[in-house]
Image: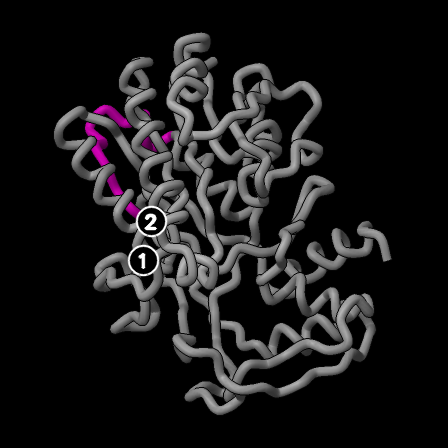
């Protein structure tokens, strides 16, 4: 059985993907997780996984992974991903997300590995010129985080042309939910659903809605929320695509194609939890588009992938996880 290296595999999406691959009968002995544990949680991983603590900015560490192990595929999650922080410290994002990625690619070439799945983002589109957002939409990031992801996508294009590195680029919309007894545990937490559920738990005095005068059905921003297990399944399906002899490189938007407003999230969370928590309307945040919804048709047809879980299931699973945390 081939070996898979998962960078950032102790993070939120990475750790769920590790568990999902094992559920699809990939042996733990064939999975190698490389993570610096800055944001990852080693305790989220199976005990029998091959875990290597290391940083992609350290060339010696990542090269040794390929020198000591035969790696056939790479799933590359490792990145900094806070949009606000990237606006304050862009150098941190360009160094980690691009230089670290280049170190990974060079180590892959040195180790004879030429298949990679890249964890990208809908942030590469910036404020889109169409909704739902297809892969034909112009990529024009509005923050260094999105720019760093787009730059690495372009690097992968060149490595495909020059070195014949096969790559699948997966542009996520709003990842959420939980499974396998693990879930979101960010510090700081910036994602809407865990913040709302923290308000339900009483960890927050209220949940803020930043603007209720958008051009949407209820005045609040609309986003495409996708279950983390659905994302993990897309990575599993992408492994098959990399095995196609004629395949070179491609990119896919991963979303449900269904828009959900901030108020929808709050009302669904109140219904799921049975708790009526406080909500406060505040001023808009700069740069928040009215609506961001994926057009997943390309992933549906080419990857043979489709999101299975709706917002009710997402919030129920996220709540089951939140209830396990200390109250």
Residue 149 is marked as: 2
**Percent position of residue 17, x then y:** 55, 37
Residue beneath disc 1:
124
Neighbor class of circle 2 (other Cα within 10 Å; few <14, some 14-19, many 20+) is many
**Percent position of residue 177, x then y:** 63, 54
Mark 2 or mark 1, earlier in chain: 1
Relative to 276, does residue 204 appear above or below in the rendering? above
At horizontal 80% and vertical 51% (from top left) the residue drawn is 325
Which image quarter: residue 59? top left
Relative to 200, does residue 109 appear above or below in the rendering? above
Relative to 2, does residue 265 appear above or below in the rendering? below
Horizontal side, residue 201 vs residue 7: left or right: right
Mark 1 element type: helix
Mark 2–mark 1 Cα distance, whole angstroms, equals 7 Å
Answer yes or no: do the residues labelled 2 and 1 have beta carbons within 8 Å?
yes
Magenta highlight range: 240-251
Can the viewer see residue 137? yes
Question: Which residue is nearer to you in this view: 97 or 6?
Answer: 97
Query: Is residue 243 in the magenta section?
Result: yes
Image quadrant where one finds the C terminus: bottom right
At horizontal 42% and vertical 61% (from top left) the residue drawn is 88
């Amino acid at each position: 059985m081939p070996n898979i290296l998962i960078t950032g595999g102790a993070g939120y999406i990475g750790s769920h993907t590790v568990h999902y691959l094992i559920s699809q009968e990939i042996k733990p002995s064939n999975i190698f997780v490389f993570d610096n544990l800055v944001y990852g949680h080693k305790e989220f991983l199976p005990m029998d996984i091959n875990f290597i603590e290391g940083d992609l900015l350290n060339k010696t560490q990542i090269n040794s992974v390929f020198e000591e192990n035969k790696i056939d595929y790479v799933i590359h999650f490792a990145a900094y991903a806070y949009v606000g922080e990237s606006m304050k410290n862009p150098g941190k994002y360009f160094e980690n997300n691009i230089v670290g990625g280049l170190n990974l690619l060079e180590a892959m070439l040195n180790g004879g590995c030429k298949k990679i799945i890249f964890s990208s983002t809908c942030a590469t589109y910036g404020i889109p010129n169409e909704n739902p957002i297809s892969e034909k939409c112009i990529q024009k990031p509005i923050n260094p985080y999105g720019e760093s992801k787009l730059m690495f996508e372009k690097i992968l294009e060149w490595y495909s042309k020059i070195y014949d590195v096969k790559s699948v680029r997966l542009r996520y919309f709003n990842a959420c939910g939980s499974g396998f007894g693990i879930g979101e545990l960010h510090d700081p937490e910036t994602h809407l659903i865990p913040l709302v559920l923290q308000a339900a738990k009483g960890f927050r005095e209220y949940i803020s809605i930043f603007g209720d005068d958008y051009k949407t059905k209820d005045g609040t921003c609309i986003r495409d929320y996708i279950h983390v297990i659905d994302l993990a399944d897309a990575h599993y399906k992408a492994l098959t695509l990399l095995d196609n002899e004629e395949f070179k490189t491609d990119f896919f938007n991963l979303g449900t194609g269904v828009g959900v407003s901030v108020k929808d999230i709050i009302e669904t969370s109140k219904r799921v939890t049975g708790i009526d928590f406080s909500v406060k309307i505040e001023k808009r945040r700069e740069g928040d588009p009215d609506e961001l919804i994926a057009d997943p048709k390309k992933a549906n047809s080419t990857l043979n992938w489709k999101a299975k879980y709706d917002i009710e299931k997402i919030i129920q699973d996220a709540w089951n996880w939140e209830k396990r945390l200390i109250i």
